[in-house]
Amino acid sequence: MRIDVLTLFPQMFDGPLSESIIKRAREKGIVEIELHDIREYSTDKHKRVDDYQFGGGAGMVMMIEPIAAAIESLKAQREYDHIIYMSPDGQTLNQQTANRLSLSGNIILLCGHYKGIDQRVRDHYITDEISIGDYVLTGGELAACVVIDSIVRLIPGAISDEESALTDTFQDGLLSAPIYTRPAVYNGWGVPDILLSGHEANIEKWREEQAYERTKQLRPDLYEKIKSPSEGKK
Ligand code: ADE
């Protein structure tokens, strides 16, 4: 998979894309992530990338020319499955979207800044708009990092124990059961006996019950969508 990121602030990606699982996935060649500074595509002698809004109003708007030049240059080199604009107006990211995007070959992530981008970019180039939540960030960069992280960890080989991505919270629409590790007792606080019983089938059943119970308590909105088989019959 290849991810091209268009941004005015490439350095904002330094930390998140060069640590841990994403770092390893890049080193292993599982994902190629290229950062492109939109300013380099400006033909303006001062390298301007933004201008005032037509019709007036507060806030600068990112101009179409440098963004279009960057996208056209990438599209001339390969085909893209998705050209995504990070925006609070977009569809809210969830596990299903991350799963779907992780199956892509090549994607572009466009990060906006200031008031936003010229609408014509959205109308003529963008295939998807993604938000990471109902709040406004200073730009799309942090949101793009979240999208990249959520999809790269799903690519086979990115996580050593592939099982662990499949059993993530949300993969089956449920939160995960509580997890514990050594010591079995800390400060007088034990762990559920069942987890020390060695009885795999009972442990599996306990985890499933816990997942339903936690989802019901903590995320009733998710629980409504996927009631436990026994609850459904009531
Ligand atoms: N850019 C600014 N705010 C954003 C958000 N909530 N999600 C995605 N991109 C954004």
Image (tube, rainbow, N blue to C red):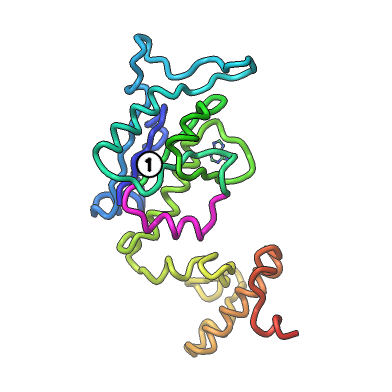
The magenta-colored residue range is: 92-106
Label 1 C-beta lies within 8 Å of the nearest ligand 1 atom: no
Task: State the SS at label 1.
Answer: strand
- Is 180 displayed left or right of 58 in the figure? left
Q: Pinpoint residue 95: horizontal percent, then vertical percent.
A: 51, 59
Q: Residue at x 61, y 72 (%)?
A: 189
Q: Residue at x 41, y 42 (%)?
A: 83
Q: Pinpoint residue 129: horizontal percent, then vertical percent.
A: 51, 43
Q: Does the magenta segment cover residue 99?
A: yes
Which residue is labeled 1 in the image?
108
**Picture quadrant where residue 186 is located:** bottom right
- Relative depth, front residue between 187 and 107: 107
Q: Pinpoint residue 76: horizontal percent, then vertical percent.
A: 26, 36
**Picture quadrant where residue 232 is located:** bottom right
- How many numbered marks appear? 1
Disc 1 residue type (three-letter): Ile
Which residue occupies the extreme right position in the image? Answer: 234
- Badge 1, how many Cα within 10 Å: few under 14, some, many 20+? many
The correct choice, above or below, for 40 with respect to 172 in the image is above
Picture quadrant of ligand 1: top right
The correct choice, above or below, for 83 with respect to 234 in the image is above
Q: Residue at x 37, y 26 (%)?
A: 38
User: Quarter of the image containing the C terminus?
Assistant: bottom right
The correct choice, above or below, for 48 with respect to 36 in the image is above
